[in-house]
Image: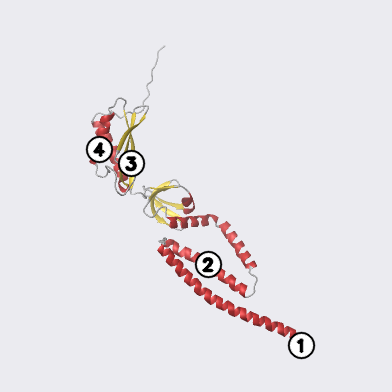
C-alpha cells in the first residue's frame, strides 16, 4: 500500500537525498578522521611550544585542555555543516550558555585568568618575598586560582590571583642587592664629622656590607652618610648601606644595635621629644 502512495518522482527525490546524504556522511567521516589526527598533532605541537617557552607545568594541562576543547568544537561544527544541518542555532546555544556560565563564574574566571598571567609572565616565583594586597611573606605555592604566602610569623595567607595580577606588588627577591636606609637622630650641637667617622667604622667592620660598586649591578654604591633633616629635637643623620638581599635583615639589625650602643658609649646623645612647661604665678 505504501508503494502505491509513493510516486516515481518521490522515489527519485528520496534516492537523490539518500545518495547525497551518504556522500555527505562519507565526507563527514573522512573529515572526522583527518580532523582527529590534526587535533592530536596540534596538541603535541602546542605542548612542545609550552616546554620550549618554559611555561610553568601547572599551566600545561589547563592550556592544552582549552586548545583541545576549541579544536573539537570547531571540528563538530564543521561536521554538522557538512551533513547539511543548520549550525547557527548550535552556535547561538553555545554562545548563550557561555555567557551564562561566564556571568555565574565571573570571580572564579578572573582568578583563573590572573593565575594564567602570573604563571606566564612570572612577576614572582615560589620562594620570593613579596608584599601585596596588604600582606607580606614568602611565596609557598602559585596555584591556578590562588597564591599562598607565609608571613614572618608563620601565618598562611591565601590571596586570589585576580587582584594579585592586576594590583601593585613589591617583590623583594628580584634584585640580588638591597639598600638598608636608616635614620639616626642626635642632639643639636653634636659634631657631625665625629658621628660620620664613628658610623663609617661600624660599616667597615661588617663583611656583609658592600664597600663599593660591584660588577654585576649598576645600582650598588659605597655606603653613604649625610644630614637629611633638622628635627624638632635634634639633627637627623641618614645612612644608606648596600648588602645582598639575603643579608638585609642581618645588616638592618646590626646597624641599629651597633650604632646605638657604640655612639652612646662615646658620649653622643640621642634626643627624645620633650615639652617644657613654664608655670607663672600671678
At horizontal 37% and vertical 52% (from top left) the residue drawn is 128
Q: Quadrant of the N terminus?
A: bottom right
**In the image, 8: left or right of 255?**
right
Q: Secondary structure at mark 1?
A: helix
Quadrant assignment, res 99: bottom right
Q: Secondary structure at mark 4?
A: helix
Return the x and y of residue 269 as percentages of the image width and height: 28, 28
Return the x and y of residue 115 as percentages of the image width and height: 46, 56
Q: Nearer the viewer, residue 111 or 183?
A: 183
Tag 2 or tag 3, which sits nearer the N-term?
2
Going by the picture, which residue comes out furthest to the top?
282
In the depicted structure, whether residue 39 falls above or below residue 238: below
Circle 4 residue: 202
Circle 3 residue: 180
Q: CA distance from mark 1 to mark 2?
A: 50 Å
Q: CA distance from mark 1 to mark 3?
A: 101 Å
Q: CA distance from mark 4 to mark 3?
A: 14 Å
Q: CA distance from mark 1 to mark 4?
A: 114 Å
In the depicted structure, whether residue 112 falls above or below residue 246: below
**In the image, 3: left or right of 263?**
right
Query: Is residue 145 visible to us here?
Result: no
Query: Is residue 80 visible to us here?
Result: yes
Discs 1, 4 touching: Cβ within 8 Å: no
In the depicted structure, whether residue 8 falls above or below residue 196: below
Circle 1 residue: 4
Circle 2 residue: 69
Q: Nearer the viewer, residue 258 or 189?
A: 189
Q: Secondary structure at mark 2?
A: helix
Tag 3 or tag 4, which sits nearer the N-term?
3
At horizontal 50% and vertical 57% (from top left) the residue drawn is 113
Amino acid at each position: 500500500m505504501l508503494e502505491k502512495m509513493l510516486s516515481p518522482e518521490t522515489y527519485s527525490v528520496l534516492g537523490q537525498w539518500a545518495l547525497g546524504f551518504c556522500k555527505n556522511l562519507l565526507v563527514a567521516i573522512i573529515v572526522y578522521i583527518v580532523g582527529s589526527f590534526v587535533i592530536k598533532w596540534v596538541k603535541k605541537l602546542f605542548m612542545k611550544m609550552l616546554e620550549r617557552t618554559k611555561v610553568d607545568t601547572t599551566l600545561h594541562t589547563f592550556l592544552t585542555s582549552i586548545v583541545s576543547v576549541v579544536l573539537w568544537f570547531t571540528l563538530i561544527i564543521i561536521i554538522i555543516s557538512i551533513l547539511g544541518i543548520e549550525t547557527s542555532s548550535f552556535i547561538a546555544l553555545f554562545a548563550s550558555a557561555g555567557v551564562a556560565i561566564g556571568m555565574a563564574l565571573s570571580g572564579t574566571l578572573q582568578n583563573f585568568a590572573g593565575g594564567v598571567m602570573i604563571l606566564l609572565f612570572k612577576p614572582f616565583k615560589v620562594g620570593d618575598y613579596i608584599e601585596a594586597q596588604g600582606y607580606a611573606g614568602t611565596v609557598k605555592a602559585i596555584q591556578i586560582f590562588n597564591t599562598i604566602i607565609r608571613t614572618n610569623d608563620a601565618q598562611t595567607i591565601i590571596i586570589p590571583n585576580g587582584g594579585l595580577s592586576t594590583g601593585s606588588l613589591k617583590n623583594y627577591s628580584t634584585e640580588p642587592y638591597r639598600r638598608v636606609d636608616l635614620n639616626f637622630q642626635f642632639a643639636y650641637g653634636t659634631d657631625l664629622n665625629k658621628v660620620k667617622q664613628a658610623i663609617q667604622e661600624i660599616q667597615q667592620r661588617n663583611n656583609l656590607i658592600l664597600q663599593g660598586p660591584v660588577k654585576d649591578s649598576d645600582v650598588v654604591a659605597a655606603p653613604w652618610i649625610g644630614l637629611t633633616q633638622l628635627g624638632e629635637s635634634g639633627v637627623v643623620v641618614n645612612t644608606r648601606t648596600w648588602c645582598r638581599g639575603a643579608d638585609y635583615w642581618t645588616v638592618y639589625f646590626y646597624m641599629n644595635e651597633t650604632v646605638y650602643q657604640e655612639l652612646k658609649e662615646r658620649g653622643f646623645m640621642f634626643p627624645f621629644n620633650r615639652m617644657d612647661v613654664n608655670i607663672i604665678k600671678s
